[in-house]
Image (cartoon, helix red, strand yellow):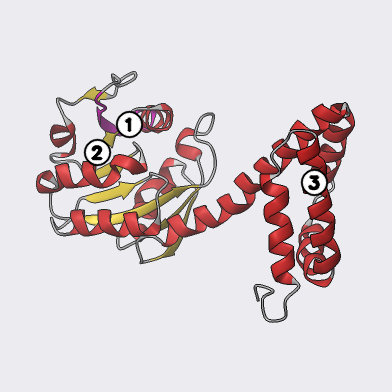
Amino acid sequence: MALVVAMLGLGEAGSAIAQDLVARSVTVRGWDPVKAPPGEVVQAGNAQDAVSGADVVLSVNTAAVALEVASSVADHLSPGTLYADLNTGAPELKRAVARAVEAAGALFVDVALMAPVPGRGIATPVLVSGQGAARFAELFAPLGMSVEVVDGRPGSAASRKLLRSVVMKGMAAAVIEGLRAAQRFGCEDWYMSEVRSIFAGADEALVERLISGSRRHAVRRSHEMRIVSEMLLSAGVHPRISMAAAEWLKELSVPGQDGR
């Protein structure tokens, strides 16, 4: 029997995944309040029509409306339907969505997209958790999705993605803060060359040095980052990341507060 998927949310990510599913002979019914479905994706009259009789529901809208959307379609889910929430939300939100759809007899799966969807589509790697995690892997891995099952608890996949965001988004903020200051000091090209060199030479040893070195030299580095913060302030750049680093290093210097 052909797989029927309801796609709730037809933004950049939802549309890309939907089109790839259609290309793999999956019937996709799409619903988005502001955007028409692309290509051969079937236009549903509303969210409830989209999910009625579907084997799988993919919720790809935003965390702000994830629970509202799930609650609005819960009574239209068939027993055993796999409801996958692909939105980036807190673990608590994922558990709330799970309760809403599981009360209707559906299986919930927390899906964390671990790379940008544009350019990857169905091949985007994901972490999954929840009662429906194994079923999701069974259905979507053969379609070309890289699926890693975490465990059976809603929110586990989300928490891992958000932990990764501490590094990725924090690193981006640090690079941009330094770039703004470098522009003020007239050394933007040199700064960007240094940043690229750091990333080009990154390996496991660098990660270990960042952790062990911060613990071992916390006092000195905290002082250094306070000086950095003062320098950035003198250039008219708010040192949000630099000040936070100084405080974090200061905390690491206190016995028993090193994060272990």
Secondary structure of residue under mark 3: helix
Secondary structure of residue under mark 1: loop
Vertical side of 121 occupied by 143: above or below: below
If the image is split into quadrants, where does the C terminus sit?
A: bottom right
Instruction: Find residue 79 and report its image quarter.
Output: bottom left
Q: Is residue 205 visible?
A: no
Q: Residue at x 80, y 67 (%)?
A: 218
Looking at numbered disc 2 in the image, what kind of residue is underneath it? Ala
Q: Residue at x 14, y 58 (%)?
A: 105
Tag of residue 230: 3
Q: Which residues are magenta?
A: 22-33
- Residue closest to the far bottom: 256
Which of pointers 2 and 3 lies earlier in the amino acid sequence? 2
Tag of residue 2: 2
Which of pointers 1 and 3 lies earlier in the amino acid sequence? 1
Q: Name the residue carrying label 1.
A: 25
Looking at numbered disc 1 in the image, what kind of residue is underneath it? Ser
Secondary structure of residue under mark 2: loop
Instruction: Find residue 95 and report its image quarter.
Output: bottom left
